Amino acid sequence: MTLSNIVVLVKYVPDATGDRKFEADNTVDRVGVDGLLSELDEYAVEQALQIKEKRADEEITVTALTVGPAEAEAAVRKALQMGADKAVHVQDDAIAGSDAAATSLVLAKAIEKIGVPELVVGGLASTDGGMSVVPAMLAERLNLPQVTLAAVVETQGDQVRIKRDGDTATEVIGGTLPLVLSVTDQSGEARYPSFKGIMAAKKKPLETLSLADIGVDASEVGLDAAWTKVEATAARPPRTAGEIVKDEDGSGATALVEFLASKKFI
Amino acid sequence: MSEVLVLVDHVDGAVRKPTYELLAIAKRIGSPSAVFIGGADKSAAVADAVKAYGADKVYVVDDTEIKGYLVAPKAEVLQQLAEKTSPAAILIPASAEGKEIAGRLSIKLSSGLITDAVDVKVEGEDIVTTQSVFAGNFTVDAKVVKGTPIIAVKPNAAAPEEGAGAGAVEEFAARISDAAKTAQIVAAQPRQSTGRPELTEAAIVVSGGRGTGGDFTAVEALADALGAAVGASRAAVDSGWKPHTFQVGQTGKVVSPQLYVANGISGAIQHRAGMQTSKTIVAVNKDEEAPIFELVDFGVVGDLHTVLPAVTAEIEKRKG
């Protein structure tokens, strides 16, 4: 099998270094805060580009796909600047508040609309929701296998091999295209867009699709259709200021041992 | 009482601690049914182990046909068991593979999924979960409102409870599709045993960061004195001082032990995300301005290379 199409999943997320919060309806505030391409998805873009570069004799198109509000265009723009060939942005007011299951539905339908590629690449988690389940849900919907959390990725012909730190062992996992792949931040530093890349990105195709375009009914997505419901969100109470001592000639060690003993850790 | 399916987390038949934690949670909801997917020769020992922690039923699924295949076959097994038993909930360990199994199962059953629960309670008719989000800065209470609740539970979410269940063993012959037998483990190198507890399961974690300067001797000695697992910050891992498997943080392991001891770790958001929900937090750092001190229950401003050996020596002395 030749590899002709790679779709990279990217997400627009609130900046983790900013002040992230919830809205009144318990959804993540994605509008009132600065956002950007999820850092962890940059590794997915990087791996997609590396696979394309390593297989230069095949004509491979890398498409960045995002689902989100108007601002989310920034996520696919960044992917285009890094070197993706084209971008698709599914944008529809009805999508707001969607859970992972609905997000995977929108992604699956969008992918079916643009043509199921031989390879779908995602990051290890978003930096906001952080469930790490969308690649698995998407794979299930597309009826594809998944190889996930790759620290090292190798492809040859229709074979994909990854190395990862599994739950209890370091594993080498093999799969056959088509499949869904996710990569970790161990897979290789993501490139910075060059000036040339930034200029070139302005001319690359960016298609915006609505739910109607991909054949999803508005009633299947959004907060009301979610399979899970957030009942309450609460800011973690600030930790009550702990005791802090300065070590002077071993006093710190003594005090620490006393603390550990008082908590019955010793 | 409705059954609650609990997927047994094991390595070649050796049951891992999160399984017992899930059984304790399952008891709050209904009658725990452990689901063991593994070697037939191990099933008797596994059944005894989970029975001792409250399993009323043990479904044994021989994995000869699916051994080495990841995620998809296990999701099919759970789907078929769920269709057979109409459980009140399905509990799965929130390991990397566990969450993916849960993700696939959620779509198969059109049922809501909650991942990384740190607590599960029953309130009236509802099963309410608690999650910790945004680097531990918020807690979220949620429930599943469609289908059978599928909950991926984090290690240390509950204490294992001994107490025998009925432990009735039932062989279950699952039908696995060929499509599920695709992604496969072609080689696995079990982690070299350090003799220390598994990082994500440990009751105590002692970590080192940039401040160690690459010398983890004092950190490891304290860990051993406390019977703890050893962790590392991203800075220490990126410097090549410890492999990535030791990393605590957003892109490494997320831990929630009874006691977390951070040594020479500044406390960047990346690291906080991995340890902020620890019950008790202690830090040793030379820099009194280090943000880690905002989180601690007890902090020592000092050089870890002198403080830790003194602490270790005193602990060893008290142990006699």
Image: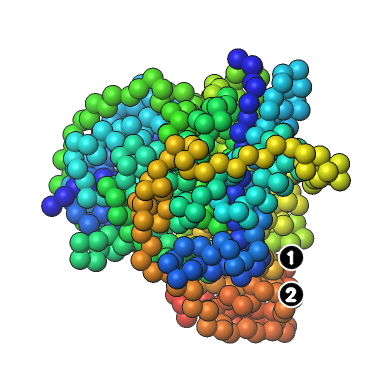
Q: Which of A189 and B190 is in front in this view?
A: A189
Kindly identify the amino acid type of the residue bearing the numbered disc 2: Lys
Horizontal arrangement in the rendering, residue A109 relative to residue A15 (left or right) = left
Kindly identify the amino acid type of the residue bearing the numbered disc 1: Gly
The residue carrying mark 1 is: B211
**In which image quadrant can residue B178 be found?**
top left
Q: Residue B238 carries which label?
A: none
Horizontal arrangement in the rendering, residue A13 relative to residue A85 (left or right) = left
The location of residue A187, given as percent across then percent down, is 68, 40
The residue that appears at 70% across and 37% down in the rendered structure is: A205
Q: Which of B97 and B10 is in front in this view?
A: B97
Q: Residue B286 carries which label?
A: 2
What SS does tag 2 mark? loop
Horizontal arrangement in the rendering, residue B77 relative to residue A92 (left or right) = left
- As measured in the structure, the alpha-carbon distance from the residue carrying label 1 to the one carrying label 2 is 8 Å
Q: Residues within 10 Å of mark 2 (few under 14, many from 20)?
A: some
Q: Are marks 1 and 2 in contact (CB under 8 Å)?
A: yes
User: Chain under label 2?
Assistant: B
Whether labels 1 and 2 belong to a single chain: the reply is yes
Q: Residues within 10 Å of mark 1 (few under 14, many from 20)?
A: many
The residue that appears at 21% across and 30% down in the rendered structure is: B171
The location of residue A145, given as percent across then percent down, is 48, 28
User: Chain under label 1?
Assistant: B
